[in-house]
Amino acid sequence: MTIPFPQNIRCRSNARITVVMILAAIAATAKGALGFEGVPGGHMPVEVSVPASTGLEAVYVLWQTDGVRASFTASDASAVKWYRFSNLGGGFAEEINAVSQGNTSSVYLTADDAGFIIESGNRRQCYWIVNYALHGCSLSSLDIAPDQECDRTALLFGGQAGKITYFTINGAAQTLSRDLNLEYNSLTYDEERHQYVPVPVSVTLESAEDVIRTEAPLCDTDFTLSGDRFLEAWGMEQHVTSPSFPTPAIAVTTTATQTERSNDNEQREETAMGGSGPVEVTFSAAVTDAVIFKEWQFARDQTFDIIDLRIQENDVVHEFDEQGTTYVRFVAGNASGSCDFYGETYTVFIGESRLDCPNAFSPGASEGTNDEWKVSYKSIVEFDCHIFNRWGLEMAHLTDPSQGWDGRYNGKLVPAGVYYYVIKARGTDGKNYKKSGDINIVRYKESGTRRN
């Protein structure tokens, strides 16, 4: 008869978290657990934990179910009732005859997958039992598909490892994973070493169809498929390996690092990369094995329609000495041109030039305070400065705008007074500077005793 269980029937009393094995030839002795007798070949049934939302205590996978006896232990076995349900769910469960012996109630299984509801007193427990003979796994061959994508690899699977479906107490179809294991080698980026290094990859598959797709490996490799977990539990795990796969997939990781300057007289630009020129930037690219074509591209056009400079190296140190914005990216491709890579675009901005000259300083008066004459500058790429006393004798010659004059000549502080500078310079924007003027040395202190 069909029992009037509601569609939302709730049977589960607790959730198991682990997958355990139970002995086939021994009936369960703990109350509320299922035992099995007469499983062919002595293969131990596999108990699989399932989500609490299924309403099931567990799913059992048996090597074969036809003629196997399932048993349930209770304090009053004669009062235990068994109901069987199909993919329609527990609302359409039908009572089946059970045999009681001592404190054990048991029923004989058929060859079909089925669900069971067991009533013991005011408690109901629900299970789904899978006949593995209907879902056998055989791994015969694994080949490389002729057509491949850059990010996904397609394998041609020969054999049988289709989806295993069980049903919740409400008749919802769920997939019971076979936990097939697909293993191969790939590469992963090591940030500390800034290179790609070998790494084994293991992918768990619920089932396998004619075509298996997985993330493309970044190095040449073969693929090994093994399983399933039920055959593994029974000591019958199968393995199949593909021919070697020459990967077309590529990956690149790029970095850009600007050489920092700490010149206290250089005016700064508020920009992510660049600023006061000239600016030195180190560009570096880590590439995977299949990369054949590669180059850094430099352009004033953000769309790279016109490329001003191409450098076919992984690592490039480039000096930006012209005012304006330059865009830099790394491109790469494999041998066949079927897979390519366009990296992050780095933006380097060099500001317009500026050159300001102070007219006084006080060497020896207060150490660390205004004791060196320096220009204030931004984006100066050429610089030549001569400093003279009033008789035309050269006191100092500066060839870099970051340099300064400490008020000394031949290692000794010069007297206070007026000195003169003559500067020729050029900025990143092409502006030429010709400057000259006075330098006043004030508050001069000699030998720590005399001050002029």
Image (tube, rainbow, N blue to C red):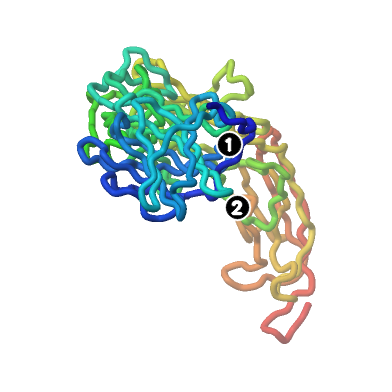
Q: Is residue 292 visible?
A: no
Kind of residue indicated by mark 1: Phe
Residue 449: where, in percent of width, then height? 72, 86
Q: Is residue 13 visible?
A: yes
Q: Badge 2 local density, few (<14 within 10 Å), some, or many (20+)?
A: few
Q: Which label is found at residue 320?
A: 1
Residue 323 shown left or right of residue 209 in the figure: right
Q: Quadrant of residue 332?
A: top left
Q: Which residue occupies 29% across, 31% down?
A: 67
Query: How far is mark 1 from mark 2, CA to CA?
Result: 14 Å
User: Counting residues from the N terminus, which is met first, the one under dot 1 or under dot 2?
Assistant: 2
Q: Secondary structure at mark 2?
A: loop
User: Which residue reaches farthest top?
Assistant: 146
Depth check: 158 or 367 in front?
A: 158
Depth check: 170 or 282 in front?
A: 170
Which quadrant of the figure contains the C terminus? Answer: bottom right
Q: Which label is found at residue 261?
A: 2
Depth check: 381 or 398 in front?
A: 381
70, above or below 211, in the image: below
Q: Quadrant of residue 292?
A: top left
302, above or below 118, in the image: above
Q: Secondary structure at mark 1?
A: strand
Residue 225 shown left or right of residue 5 in the figure: left
Residue 246: where, in percent of width, then height? 29, 23
Numbered-mark total: 2
Kind of residue indicated by mark 2: Arg
Q: Badge 1 local density, few (<14 within 10 Å), some, or many (20+)?
A: many
User: Which residue reaches farthest bottom?
Assistant: 449
Residue 273: where, in percent of width, then height? 63, 41
Q: Which residue occupies 30% across, 22% down?
A: 160
Q: Which residue occupies 67% across, 67% down?
A: 407
Residue 186 shown left or right of residue 321 in the figure: left
